[in-house]
Image (cartoon, helix red, strand yellow):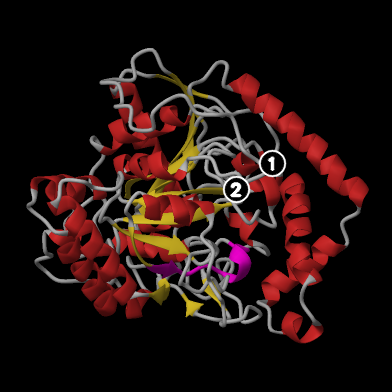
Amino acid sequence: MPMTTNDSPTELAELSASEALALFRRGALSPVELTEDCLARIERDNPAVNAFAHVDGERALAAARDAEARWHAGRPCGALDGVPTTIKDLTLTVGMPTRLGSTTTSPQGPWDTDAPVSRHLKEAGAVVLGKTTSPEFGWKGVTDNPLHGITRNPWDTRLTPGGSSGGAAAAAALNLGLLHQGSDAGGSIRIPCGFTGTFGIKPTFGWVPQWPASAMGTLSHLGPMTRTAADSALMLSVMARPDARDGYLGNPRTEDWLTPPPTSLKGWRIAYSPDLGYVNVAPDIAARVRSAVGLLRELGATVEEVHPGFEDPRRIFDTLWFAGASQALERLDEAQRAALDPGFLDIARRGQDISMRDYLAAQRERERLVARMQAFHERYDLLVTPTLPLAPFEAGHNVPPEGPYRDWMDWTPFSYPFNLTQQPAASLPCGLDDQGLPVGLHLVGPRFRDLNVLHAARLLEHRLSPCPLPGRSRG
């Protein structure tokens, strides 16, 4: 059923990170007060959605007290000082278990290493509330796992929030923490943002360091999940910093993530593809996306309905994805393999059958797809599509219970092509479907032009109707 919180939500429960920092700066709000509010709402609201794999209130409050002292002294330590934040259960974090959603991992730790993203967030003063849920090893587009159970959608707890960053999306929708780290190797930021009415961006590959490297290799991107595009830009200004441990460092950035958007999109050329030329999209979702595209024209952009011109690259993606999944089996004994999510075990075993010849052939096809999209974006500043072709479905299923689906990729055709191309891509809420559930607008930019995506999103979100949870206002 729809999850309804207090009829009169507190002001703190509605704050963005940017608003919270402004209040800290004026001395009108304490990081301790905000953290206590987040922890109280986690205790109240999380049981219904299961967004958290781990919560550490004591550690969070200690960090908030340190931040409070720095703000009182007029010396904040970084851009996020005192902001309650969450980290995905796939990302190493000192003092907090990283179990990868799997019973095959040990609870013993020692949990004494920060991944680059965890380190950068903490150095900027972020108050880490805990770890958010993921499917086992982040392998699918919904969120449930053998260790922590099923994560649910705050809009209707009978439904899935998507995945694999489903815990982060559910937490973001409820503002259980103001900033949330996700990861995306086939849509795992954008899918759950589309299903929960939140914003998330998969930045250009290589700008956010990732260590240890994902089993999915260069398909995997780390990025922010928030309630506004401005908060994601703020988070990226901290996350997207080099780390010597990452062997895939991308093109060095020269632009500031916090560069303000233009006042209009005059002079922009935007490609609008309602279905990529081959996807069956629910009519109500297609209508909401088309309406949002009209706002791009109102903002001054020249919008052309055109497809990017590639056939479904599913076979390329499956080859690389399944081969990556098979790596997990190499370090597990038979008893551990028997404890795995059956769906994950299936694709991992399918990956074991992929030959080196087929793997290298897929890489060559991927290179051709990258070249095609590079050429496409010589003509267009942005590509716009739906984020998803369908509404959230029943939680606890990998695919909609009724329909011609076998794998999660069958119902996520808009996201994985752009992991293959390593482009920046975001999901922005653009209204509600006929069931009253969120619809996502998918914004894809040229590689290394992440600001195209962020700026268009920031302009659009001021014109789009708010996407509040049932029983809540988002101002």
Specify whether residue 472 is in view.
no
Dot 2 and dot 1 residues touching (CB under 8 Å): yes
Highlighted range, magenta: 130-140
Horizontal side of residue 358 vs 400, given as left or right: right
Q: Does the magenta portion include 133?
A: yes
Mark 1 highlights which residue? 312
Q: In this view, does 436 lie above or below 420?
A: below
Q: Where is residue 335 in the image (x, y as percent from the top left)?
A: 76, 87
Residue drawn 55% across the image and 29% down it:
252
- In the image, is residue 49 above or below residue 305? below
Q: What residue type is labelled 1?
A: Asp
Query: Label 2 amino acid?
Result: Pro
Residue 291 drawn above or below residue 80: above
Measure the alpha-carbon separation of dots 2 and 1: 8 Å
120 relative position to 102: left or right: left
Mark 1 surroundings within 10 Å by alpha-carbon count, few (fewer than 14), some (14 through 19), many (20 or more): some
Place residue 43 in its image quadrant. bottom left
Image-based side of 137 in relation to 123, left or right:
right
Mark earlier in primary sequence (2, 1): 1
Q: In which quarter of the image is residue 37?
A: bottom left
